[in-house]
């Protein structure tokens, strides 16, 4: 079908011309960076208007393709998010018109969309309109009980974080084909069942809350340590997750795990300013300047943790992790960290959830409390776990322990293996530097 007039840049749109020094690759990189930021806003706004989450995702992808086609020629728009929204809305209108608007609901949607399109003096305002609530509503929709528990988180991560199927599979330590099937089935269920796009209440809210907490937790983790790309942090995702966590504690004030998750995110986020240097390179926990940790955010996190405990949730999945982070934030120096207590907390967490990643973290804590010689066999045993075969932090931890034991050549090999598996460029570079440092400390042949 012919392209929409909105897709043909006109003089009154005042798109800046692409600089002669800006290559097509530069523009494509800009498109992908903008899309990564705007994708959640586009999907939430479109899902609200169309009442169809999979269609909203498809239209967002089409807007990306339109940008990849037009921006290298016309230049990046002054308001790229509004440009993408305009394209996605027009495609949505075209889609509804092709279905001939037989149902009254569709007629109403088209009329509302057309009126909104005409009465939008500032396109950017539409992108920010009730975004926090809409994003949470999208997650509640994706976490409907008709979808399998495993599919809910995978679908939300794809739509909200923009992760690829491969990256989601890595996050869950599962085969890529398994995750792909879950996402396809979940989208089909959403399309065919006519599920309400809503934030539920009462029993329906409680029924979905555990899955919603899991999704918010995974969104925060992706922001806190990005699985891919050139930046180690994605602050906007951390902020979105924190905002949703605060909303969840207000709509589910008696749910201890909601407070536990908020505590975990607040305490972790308190360290963000110290986690990278001026160039954006990672700074590991033991090397961070603790004076940069946000004390106000630490207090908020401790208050949320106290509330989780008051509600009887001290042994919950998120509260236990928050308690571990609290051990770090409460230590003025690395030497003051209560590592034996952290080992105990990881033991409680391992009793609650069977996870090789938890066991790996517990081994790290044991190494700090009892020495690397005690921890190394525990880490070596985890190498046989099928789900950790492509998990770069296993080799990274192994390299660190080998370094402390003076086995520098083995440590170098472990760090290099970890770098090969890492998906984030900053983390990969850090691991390569650690490999080079390890080999530089190896004894030279006499």
Image: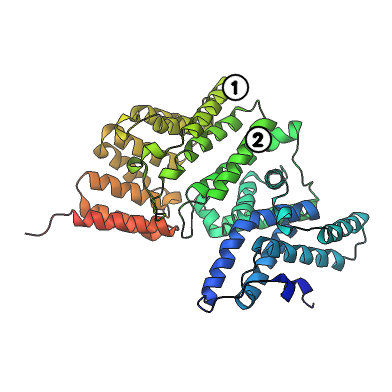
Q: Secondary structure at mark 1?
A: loop
How far apart, in angstroms, are the residues tagged by discs 1 and 2?
A: 15 Å
The residue under the point 52% across, 24% down is 314
Residue 290: image tag: none
Quadrant in which the N terminus appears = bottom right
Residue 408: give x, y in percent of width and height. 21, 52
Give the answer, above or below, for where 306 lies relative to 218: above
Residue 248: image tag: 2
Q: Secondary structure at mark 2?
A: helix
The residue under the point 29% across, 41% down is 377
Residue 170: give x, y in percent of width and height. 50, 54
Q: In the drawing, does residue 132 fall left or right of residue 372? A: right
Dot 2: within a 10 Å radius of its alpha carbon, few (fewer than 14), some, or many (20 or more) residues?
many
Work out whether residue 4 can be spotted.
no
Work out whether residue 250 can be spotted.
yes
The residue under the point 68% across, 47% down is 135
Quadrant in which the C terminus appears = bottom left
Residue 255: give x, y in percent of width and height. 63, 28
Give the answer, above or below, for where 139 lies relative to 256: below
Residue 338 occupies quadrant:
top left
Residue 311: image tag: 1
Q: In the drawing, does residue 378 fall left or right of residue 94? A: left
**In front: 89, or 348?**
89
Give the answer, above or below, for where 43 lies relative to 369: below
Q: In the drawing, does residue 168 fall left or right of residue 405? A: right
């Amino acid at each position: 079908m012919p392209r929409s007039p909105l897709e043909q840049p006109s003089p009154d749109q005042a798109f800046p011309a692409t600089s002669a020094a800006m290559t097509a690759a530069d523009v494509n990189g800009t498109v992908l960076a903008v899309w990564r930021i705007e994708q959640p806003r586009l999907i939430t706004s479109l899902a609200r208007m169309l009442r169809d989450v999979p269609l909203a995702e498809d239209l967002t992808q089409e807007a990306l393709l339109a940008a990849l086609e037009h921006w290298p020629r016309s230049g990046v728009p002054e308001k790229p998010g509004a440009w993408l929204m305009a394209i996605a809305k027009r495609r949505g209108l075209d889609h509804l018109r092709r279905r001939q608007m037989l149902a009254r609901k569709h007629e109403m949607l088209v009329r509302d969309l057309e009126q909104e399109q005409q009465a939008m003096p500032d396109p950017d305002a539409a992108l920010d309109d009730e975004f926090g609530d809409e994003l949470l509503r999208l997650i509640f929709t994706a976490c409907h009980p008709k979808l399998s528990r495993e599919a809910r988180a995978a679908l939300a991560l794809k739509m909200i974080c923009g992760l690829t199927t491969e990256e989601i599979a890595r996050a869950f330590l599962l085969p890529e084909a398994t995750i792909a099937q879950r996402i396809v089935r979940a989208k089909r269920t959403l399309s065919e069942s006519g599920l309400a796009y809503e934030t539920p209440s009462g029993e329906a809210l409680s029924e979905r809350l555990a899955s919603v907490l899991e999704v918010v937790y995974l969104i925060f983790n992706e922001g806190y340590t990005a699985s891919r790309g050139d930046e180690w942090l994605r602050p906007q995702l951390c902020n979105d997750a924190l905002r949703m966590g605060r909303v969840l504690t207000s709509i589910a004030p008696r749910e201890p795990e909601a407070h536990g998750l908020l505590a975990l995110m607040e305490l972790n986020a308190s360290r963000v300013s110290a986690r990278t240097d001026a160039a954006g390179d990672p700074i590991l926990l033991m090397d961070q300047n603790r004076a940069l940790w946000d004390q106000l955010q630490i207090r908020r996190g401790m208050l949320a943790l106290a509330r989780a405990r008051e509600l009887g949730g001290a042994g919950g999945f998120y509260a236990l992790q928050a308690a571990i982070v609290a051990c770090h934030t409460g230590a003025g120096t690395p030497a003051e960290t209560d590592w034996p207590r952290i080992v105990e907390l990881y033991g409680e967490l391992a009793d609650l959830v069977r996870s090789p990643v938890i066991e790996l973290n517990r081994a790290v804590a044991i190494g700090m409390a009892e020495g690397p010689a005690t921890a190394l066999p525990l880490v070596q045993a985890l190498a046989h776990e099928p789900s950790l075969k492509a998990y770069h932090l296993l080799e990274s931890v192994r390299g660190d322990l080998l370094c402390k034991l003076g086995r520098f050549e083995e440590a170098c090999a472990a760090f290099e293996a970890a770098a090969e598996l890492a998906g984030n460029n900053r983390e990969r570079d850090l691991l390569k530097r650690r490999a080079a440092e390890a080999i530089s400390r190896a004894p030279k042949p006499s």
